[in-house]
Image: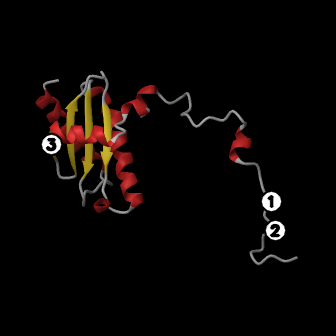
Amino acid sequence: MAFSSGCGPRVAGPSSRTAAGRDASASPPDHVAPDRRFPRSSRLTSRRQYRAIYGDGVRVRRSSLTLFSRPNDLGRCRLGITATRKCGHAVRRNRIKRVLREIFRHHRARIATGVDIVVNARPGADFDDYARIEREFVGALEQVVRRLGR
């Protein structure tokens, strides 16, 4: 029996779950520092939360992003990110969100506790220039903190 690709027949190998063992977990490895994680408790998760921040929060505009913020009574910061289709295709939007989450994780200690933040990516922004986006994000955060008086 000949195969057109020059390879032999496909043999089913062990799945990743069985290869790693039945007790494999999707949680981050133990060597990841807790302050570098982005747990669900640090995220805005519902439309109602976003709308509350848009409605009566402080807004700061930059060339590549718009940041909304509002105090909360939780004693921790939460982040929400939006990137519309105007920002590009799905791969591009996901990259934008990864970059913004990474910047948030790195600068979380600078942010006052008890603040909800929503970042809207603006169309046409060059999110490949990490340093510029980081400067804009941090500058907007500092301005929001001053406005909120926290």
Q: Quadrant of residue 67?
A: top left
Mark 2 is surrounded, within 10 Å at the Cα level, by few (under 14), some (14 to 19) or many (20 or more) other residues, namely few
3D distance between C-alphas at marks 3 and 1: 56 Å
3D distance between C-alphas at marks 2 and 1: 9 Å
Secondary structure category for the residue under label 2? loop
- Residue 11 bears which disc, if any? 1
User: Which quarter of the rendering shows the N terminus?
Assistant: bottom right
Secondary structure category for the residue under label 1? loop
Nearest-to-viewer mark from 2 and 1: 1
The percent coordinates of residue 10 (x first, y second) are: 78, 64
Residue 130, compared with residue 110, is above or below; it is below
Residue 46, compared with residue 14, is above or below; it is above
Q: Quadrant of residue 119?
A: top left
Which scheme is used to colour this image of the protein? secondary structure
Residue under circle 2? 8
Which residue lies at the image location 74% right of the left edge and 75% below the top edge?
Answer: 5
Which residue lies at the image location 25% right of the left edge and 26% below the top edge?
Answer: 72
3D distance between C-alphas at marks 3 and 2: 60 Å
Q: Are marks 2 and 1 in contact (CB under 8 Å)?
A: yes
- Residue 117 bears which disc, if any? none
In the depicted view, which residue is nearer to us: 76 or 104? Answer: 76
Nearest to N terminus: mark 3 or mark 1: 1
Three-letter amino acid code at disc 3?
Val
The percent coordinates of residue 45 (x first, y second) are: 37, 39
User: Which quarter of the rendering shows the C terminus?
Assistant: top left
Nearest-to-viewer mark from 3 and 2: 3
- Residue 60 bears which disc, if any? 3
Secondary structure category for the residue under label 3? strand
